[in-house]
Image (spheres, rainbow, N blue to C red):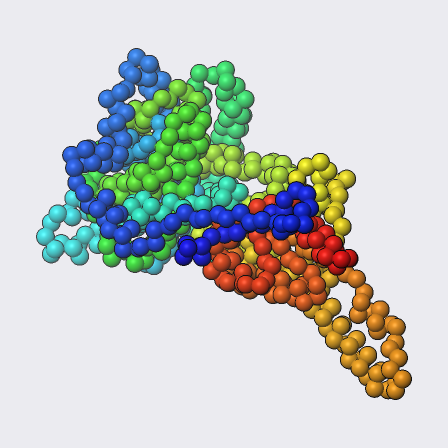
Amino acid sequence: MAELNNVHSVTEVPEGDDAKRSFHHRIFLEPQEKKRSMKALVVKQAKKTCSCTPAKVKDYVFSFFPVLQWLPKYKLREYLLGDIMSGVIVGVLLVPQSIAYSLLAGQEPIYGLYTSFFAGIIYFIFGTSRHISVGIFGVICLMVGQVVDREIQRAGYDLEPAAHSVLIDTATYANTTISPVNQTLQKLLCDKSCYAITVGATMTFIAGVYQVAMGFFQVGFVSVYLSDSLLSGFVTGASFTILTSQAKYLLGLDIPRSSGIGSLVATWINIFRNIHKTNICDLITSFLCFLVLIPTKELNEHFKSRLKAPIPVELVVIVAATLASHFGKLRETYGSSVAGHIPTGFLPPRPPDWNLIPNVALDAIPIAIIGFAITVSLSEMFAKKHGYSVKANQEMYAIGFCNIIPSFFHCFTTSAALAKTLVKESTGCRTQISSMVTSLVILLVLLVIAPLFYSLQKCVLAVITIVNLRGALRKFRDLPKMWHLSRVDTVIWLVTMAASALISTEIGLLVGVCFSMLCVIFRTQRPEAPLLGWVAESETYESLSAYKNLQTKPGIVVFRFEAPLYYINKECFKSTLYKQTRVNPVWVKAAKKKAAKRMLREKEVDSGGNETSTSMDFVSEPLGFHTIVIDCCAVQFLDTAGIRTLKEVCKDYKEIGVQVLLAQCNPSVRSSLIRGEFFKEGEDHLLFHSVHQAVDFALGLQGHTGTSASK
């Protein structure tokens, strides 16, 4: 019977009192055998991974390239019209946004178009979501732009806006295949815009490598530390930084972009110092664009159920502003800052600058995490809405390759974007064929239309960027509802938002994660720990502080601790238990010893041997209960400190005549108690499946003891 050592005993009291048998019997639960051989587990996993069969190779290829699964099953008549319509509409909206967000990332407009073009094609091949739109995302562009500005400053380039040298840039890329003798000449030809995209592409490559590595090692669990409230607060805080970075374009100010800690405050100080240099032409243009964009966007949202497609107001504004700037000669007459020459076609591919990797490797970590967290969360949200499933690890591969491959084609970091995904869904998208259509629209712009945007004012692009921040800034309207639902989540949102806006985006994200984890720790450090009462005519026990008309059993206190018991909250467990029972066994033992010493001294003084009644009354003062039942249903786990604390509590209460029973322990807690030698022979530390069983046992034990004493 060696296996009895691994048997958990649960005690319960039978109904009725029978003098011929014991007042309780035990139920034995034999645990399942667990294979703990790490060697066997590793060998099994290695065989499973390394085995190669034609069927397994096929499954692997089909899972790694999801397009091979769904494209042969494509329903042409049913899906094609919706995919084409949504692809064209998203493409029309994406062209002006790609140009606008390029400024945010510190890049030339052409690189934003490249990024949107390649992202859609690559996600079409690797992605599992049918609806999300992968491309330029404002927060990611902001984080890329901050690193680009820092590296440009380190490299010694002038931070003031310079004339665009795209032709020189093209020559530089064309010379990448020439012998190493020309390397010095290449560096001389690479101007500020060339170096900016080199930094952006290198960081994009590293971020993509991180994301693919996360998928390979299946560390998608990292995203669980980015709660919805944290991500929402981060995006809102970053939106303030985006708005601040674009404010100088609204006013036509020629000031350097601030970076680092406190960049938001520094930028506004710089703006107000130079406010007298405002370009009136840019200011009026910005005001007129706001007057057109905001009401039309509101109409699009208000009538989205009636409109078959949203009004492409951004494209209309860009076309109108470009024509007005060109024929009005706003650059020559008023000095307005314009987009400049945007070349057609594609530049030759170029690898990332490996020498820059040590400078940007750390900055790429938060960009990679934010990118895959947003992509995975949006994929799962729309998959659930439309009744299909996505693979989180494959999504990490997809977004990783959306960054790795385009980094060789002068692109910067991408991720899924909520606003464009909503447009895509609402306009009839059924599959990622719509992404290919969107890429074709952008390709048309790249090959034919791009040079026509030469005279487009940068203030117009800044207005488009700011107007698209409305969704994130509207989160302030949801704060009362969020506060009503969860005050902790609201505080996390506020802290993350403030840190992201006032300190920096990267530090704000780190502050948000750390603060969220601290909130979890604080919740377990000071958890709820009520006394329980019996619900009449049932076997249920609930909190006395939460419900009325609950009954208590005489001489029995039922206590519930609603958190894991570990080193952080062990003192809270003891102090709360002592407070709720109003009996601290340590103090009671100390008082008894003190009273005993006083009695001994009085006996020595009083030769007649008369004892004082006050001392005897104190020593024999009843506690009011004889049993404490600890409801462990909310105790998920115990550590060594928690086991030691339970031992101390049971020992201390036993010494003053109170027994402690544990009820509703889960298998993990039971296993920890057994490994910690909590149960010893001769001690009545018993486990019970329910509080009701424990209470019945205590009542039966007390009745049996009382009967024996009376006899």
Quadrant where the C terminus is found in the figure: bottom right
Position of 314 with respect to 66 (left or right) is right
The image quadrant of residue 574 is bottom right
Vertical relation: 275 (above or below) 293: below
Q: Residue furthest front?
A: 20
* Nearest to the observer: residue 139 or residue 83: 83
Depth check, front residue: 231 or 261: 231
Image quadrant where residue 73 sits: top left
Residue 168 drawn at (x, y percent): 22, 45
Whether residue 412 can be seen here: no
- The residue shown at (71%, 43%) is 534
Question: Residue 459: image x %, image y %?
Answer: 44, 37
Position of the N terminus, as image quadrant, is bottom left
> In the displayed structure, does residue 370 sit left or right of residue 112?
right
Q: Is residue 473 visible?
A: yes
Q: Tell me what residue is drawn at x 71 percent, y 66 percent.
A: 656
Q: Can you give x and y, in whole percent of width and height, for residue 180 in the image?
A: 12, 55
Q: Where is residue 540 in the image (x, y as percent from the top left)?
A: 66, 40
Residue under the point 33% across and 17% down: 79
User: Left of 118 or right of it: where is 462?
Assistant: right
Tag count: 0
For the point 69% across and 69% down, which residue is it? 586
Residue situated in front as seen by the camera: 137 or 521: 521
Furthest residue in direction top, as rendered? 77
Viewer-proximal residue, 148 or 376?
376
